[in-house]
Image (tube, grey):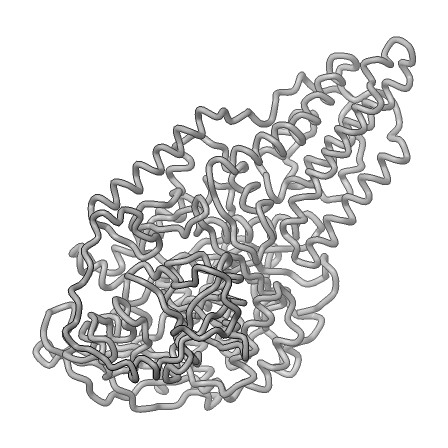
Amino acid sequence: MSHEAFPTDNPAVVTVGLPYANGDLHVGHLRGYVTGDTVARALRRVGQQTAFVCGSDMHGTPIAVNAAKEGVSPEAFALEYHEEYAETFPKFNVEFDNYGHTHDETNVETTQEFVRSWIDGDHVVEKEIQVAYDPADDQWLPDRLVEGTCPYCGEDARGDECDEGCQRHLEPGEVEDPVSTLSGNPAEYREREHKFLRLSDFQDYLQAFIDRMDGTDNAKNQPREWIEGELQDLCITRDMDWGIDYPGEDGEGEEDLVLYVWVDAPIEYVSSTKQYTDRVGEDAFDWEEVWTVDDEDELTGEDNGEIVHVIGRDIIQHHAVFWPAMLRGAGYNEPRAILATGFVGIDGKALSTSRNRAVWADEYLDEGFHPDLFRYYMINGSGMETDVDFSWDRFAERVNGELVGNLGNFCYRSLLFAERNYDGTPDADVSDDVRERIEDAIDEFEAALNEYRVRDVGAVPIELADYGNEYIQRNEPWKLTDDDPERAAQVIRDCVQIAKAIAVLMQPVMPEKADALWAQLGEDGSVEDARLDEALDAPPATFDEPEELFGQIEDERIEELNEKLAERVEEATEDGEDDAEEANEDTMDFEPESLTDERISFDDFGDLDMRVGEIETAEPIEDSDKLARLEVDIGVETRQVVAGIKQLHDLAELPGTRVVLLANMEKAELFGVESNGMVLAAGDEADLLTTHGDAPLGSKIQ
């Protein structure tokens, strides 16, 4: 890779985290794919040769479990969702150059080639670990296929996590009274040899890589705690039938072992690029120029391809630690940049699929809204690293104000005036001031792209339209047509040129609407083929009467959509599909647990050191569905605490929240993160305990 400004002489590949073929797509999923598509389009806009690739993630325990529940094979189950995704993405103008899946022949072969390279490089080691086993069915069981009792709190737990109780990570063999979720048979833990990628072999490399990697701050900073500490080896095999076979040293595979899903999933990026080259030919795009290097010592060379990954922030570790090590071990090129997005909430609350508090992809389209409106909302709604809250009210507000009232209004009134008075573009030169403003917009676009400020890429045409509205209003050409026709023609000429520049600049975010504006200007072909500098080329001399690009969303429409969402959430709640992402607001039906008969003495209570604290930071813990890492200021010091509130609270809103912390709780390590204390909360919905008044931080609870 290079670190030269785009465009470079090297080909580029943009990827997005693979969707897991296990359920329908909603707006939370779509944020990443819209962002990746925008980045790819923006790179092409500046003249960068770019392939945009992805694929469906087809393997893993959840797919095998859900397929068994439906009585179909895992392949058939996953393929159904894969086909659904392949049909849905284009409906949101997300246009992959290639969209494959991890179970296709190309990825199977490429994945096994990677693993054989690690074996040949002596990067794979064998270790004996505890693995669940069903002796009645003679079947090894991944931890997700085991249920039992948590040894710490007594609640029902999975083999790897107490998901119903204390949220602790459970090591193999810790869960009590284990049973197989497949057969219901009692399970037992036995020693089993598994294969590990020795990440410590790549520690020095990873430490240097993270320093030179481009991308968002969270992607660059979050991995440091792993690569600067003691790197744990990555177990790359699982006891399953569903997956890609571990190739073994002889290449024949090993009995009952398949590769961990996080081995073959990122390798699909390479495989999908290969498939693109197979389809268009090496002369059009050569995958090897991007992914391979002639010499491992030249991994950072300027002649290597530009790889840009767009992911959710929950999989930073996989892409900034595991994946570079996997590439390095196989002699492949490293990523130039990793861009990690924030999450998406619904109406100020966490998105909840079981409560149906979600806006589904097909639902959005069925409501008749244009896909570019959604794309604009996702890109311009917040910075890439920041969480986005999707609400129909805010959606309408942004569409009506920024697209209808600003960009659409300027383009329509300018082109309508030009067509009615001049049959198109007036015969006049663009003024120096307007030319300079368009040149500035082009520079802003290029700078935003090279600094990976995707929101600012989307803001450039909006700000140019804002300038255009101010310009036309200030010059009032409708008053000049009789008194100063030459000046009127020059003003409208400027406005038509601004409209053309807007079409060129808005294309990465709103490609279909940009094409519509391009056609209204009478331009040939598609705006997709236009480069940035064409924003200053003269528009056609004649064009037809324009149509408005955007339509107003009425208040009554939004009220209807809000009512539909509220009804769905209520129905899901009444059906008993409780979800730990929203506090139970109906306390009348709450049945408290019976009191324990056991009593403690006042002295025992005095041994509890509970302090008033304030949450300073809150962030999700990788690989855990429910755990979050908190930093809590308790006056005398700041404590790191792990709490099972990831799905129960909007973590971005927690900083500044007063809490009660049990300070002398025994330290524990959960998912590799040390917890030094316990934040107290009430009930299954984790209602955080606080104080009535403003007790100073560090005050002891008595």
Q: Is residue 577 visible?
A: yes
Point out the image quarter for the C terminus: bottom left
Q: Nearer the viewer, residue 314 or 432?
A: 314
Residue 86's place in the image compared with 634, above or below, is: above
Q: Nearer the viewer, residue 346 or 548?
A: 346
Residue at 45% across / 30% down in the picture?
558
Q: Is residue 518 visible?
A: no
Q: Nearer the viewer, residue 317 or 288?
A: 317
Furthest toward the left, the residue is: 136
Residue at 64% across / 44% down in the picture?
458
Point out the image quarter for the N terminus: bottom right
Q: Quadrant of residue 256?
A: bottom left
Residue at 32% across / 65% down in the picture?
59
Q: Position of residue 540 (x, y in %)?
A: 76, 25
Q: Position of residue 66 (x, y in %)?
A: 23, 59
**In the image, 689: left or right of 189?**
right
Q: Quadrant of residue 300?
A: bottom right
**In the image, 113: left or right of 248?**
right
Q: Nearer the viewer, residue 366 or 287?
A: 366
**In the image, 566: left or right of 619?**
left
Q: Quadrant of residue 550?
A: top right
Q: Position of residue 572 (x, y in %)?
A: 26, 44
Residue at 32% across / 63% down in the picture?
682
Furthest toward the top, the residue is: 482
Q: Position of residue 224 (x, y in %)?
A: 57, 78
Residue 434's place in the image compared with 663, above or below, is: above
**In the image, 297: left or right of 681?**
right
Give the tally of numbered discs: 0
